[in-house]
Image (cartoon, helix red, strand yellow):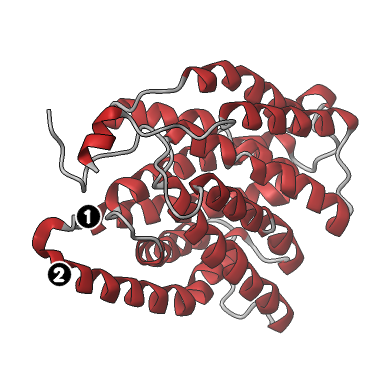
């Protein structure tokens, strides 16, 4: 069966000017700063998420408009051969993104910046499973071998071996992080399915606008949304919007679009490791020895799951 370019999804890592794994790694490191900046802002989950979205839009919208203008020029040259995106899927993904970021922020307050980021990244299993169920994307054998190791590392980093490692509310934080992981995986899949080839900033801008709405609704019902958080908090949230929302998500969108779901999800597990280390350096949130062991295990598993750049399949070679 032949699929159009707008609905086809990658099963191998396609070659491009920049290795998509590098884009995903760079984006992951940007987002690893997010929980630190959220903690420094001292704001509620809804407040942090709403402001990171609203403050990111003035940067993302112009980027998206420039991207759209460039695509129009390409379409004018080649006609309707350029596939179009599906904005409704991106909006749906953005709603999930707002839920993810709000729940994750609550988990940061409950279980710590680094550990909450480790726990939310059980999406490494959820995303490939969703891709398999929704679009029939095959899962690489190396990923299947690495999953138990990854989950073991996540469990250790989450404090399972030492009763939460002194977290304020380890059970609540774990539940919130797991719910956020489901929403996170749904966002990543819908963003990829809804974006046209070559789109990065435009879909992220649209998803961010939708996330602002869903996070405001959830935040209003849960701990409230403070529309005047103060200048110091606004400064941290502006930095969060620039690094975590704009730079991080645009880089991840560019990398994930050219990676299999299993590989991309594995690389995103570098986020929690970076968050744990930054939590130590900036916030003084020192994890236990077992949590550090878990971070090392995650790094090794990620390196194994994404250790080589796959060649295009014969079908892709013919199509290109």
Q: Which residue is mark 1?
A: 86
Where is residue 26? Give x, y as percent: 61, 54
Q: Secondary structure at mark 2?
A: helix
Residue 119 placement (x, y as % from top left)? 64, 36
User: Does the rendering let one see residue 314?
Assistant: yes
Q: Is residue 289 above or below residue 271?
A: above
Quadrant in the picture for the N terminus: top left
Q: Secondary structure beneath disc 1?
A: loop
What's the CA distance linking mark 1 and mark 2?
A: 22 Å
Which residue in the protein does label 2 denote? 77
- For disc 1, the neighbor class at 10 Å (few under 14, some 14 to 19, many from 20) is some
Residue 263: image x %, image y %? 50, 34
Please give the name of the residue rendered at 28% of the width and 51% of the height, measured from the top-left corner. 194
Q: Quadrant of the C terminus?
A: top left
Tag nearer the camera, 1 or 2: 2
Name which of mark 1 and mark 2 comes first in the sequence.
Answer: 2
């Amino acid at each position: 069966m032949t699929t159009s370019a707008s609905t086809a999804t990658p099963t191998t890592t396609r070659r491009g000017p920049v290795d998509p794994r590098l884009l995903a790694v760079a984006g992951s490191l940007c987002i690893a700063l997010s929980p630190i900046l959220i903690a420094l802002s001292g704001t509620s989950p809804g407040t942090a998420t709403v402001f990171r979205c609203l403050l990111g839009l003035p940067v993302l919208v112009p980027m998206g408009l420039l991207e759209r203008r460039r695509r129009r020029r390409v379409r004018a040259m080649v006609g309707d051969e350029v596939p179009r995106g599906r904005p409704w899927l991106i909006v749906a993904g953005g709603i999930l993104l707002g839920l993810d970021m709000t729940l994750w922020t609550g988990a940061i307050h409950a279980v710590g910046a680094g550990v909450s980021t480790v726990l939310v990244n059980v999406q490494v299993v959820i995303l490939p499973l969703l891709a398999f169920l929704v679009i029939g994307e095959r899962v690489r054998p190396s990923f299947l071998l690495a999953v138990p190791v990854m989950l073991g590392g996540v469990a250790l980093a989450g404090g399972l071996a030492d009763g939460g490692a002194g977290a304020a509310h380890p059970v609540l934080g774990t539940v919130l992080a797991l719910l956020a992981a489901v929403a996170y995986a749904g966002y990543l899949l819908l963003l990829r399915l809804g974006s046209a080839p070559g789109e990065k900033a435009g879909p992220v801008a649209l998803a961010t606008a939708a996330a602002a709405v869903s996070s405001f609704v959830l935040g209003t019902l849960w701990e409230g949304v403070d529309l005047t958080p103060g200048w110091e908090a606004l400064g941290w949230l502006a930095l969060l919007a620039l690094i975590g929302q704009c730079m991080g998500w645009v880089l991840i969108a560019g990398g994930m679009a050219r990676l299999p779901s299993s590989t991309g999800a594995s690389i995103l597990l570098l986020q929690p490791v970076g968050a744990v280390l930054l939590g130590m350096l900036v916030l003084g949130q020192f994890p236990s020895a077992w949590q550090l062991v878990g971070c090392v295990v995650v790094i090794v598993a990620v390196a194994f799951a994404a250790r080589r750049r796959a060649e295009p399949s014969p079908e892709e070679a013919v199509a290109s």
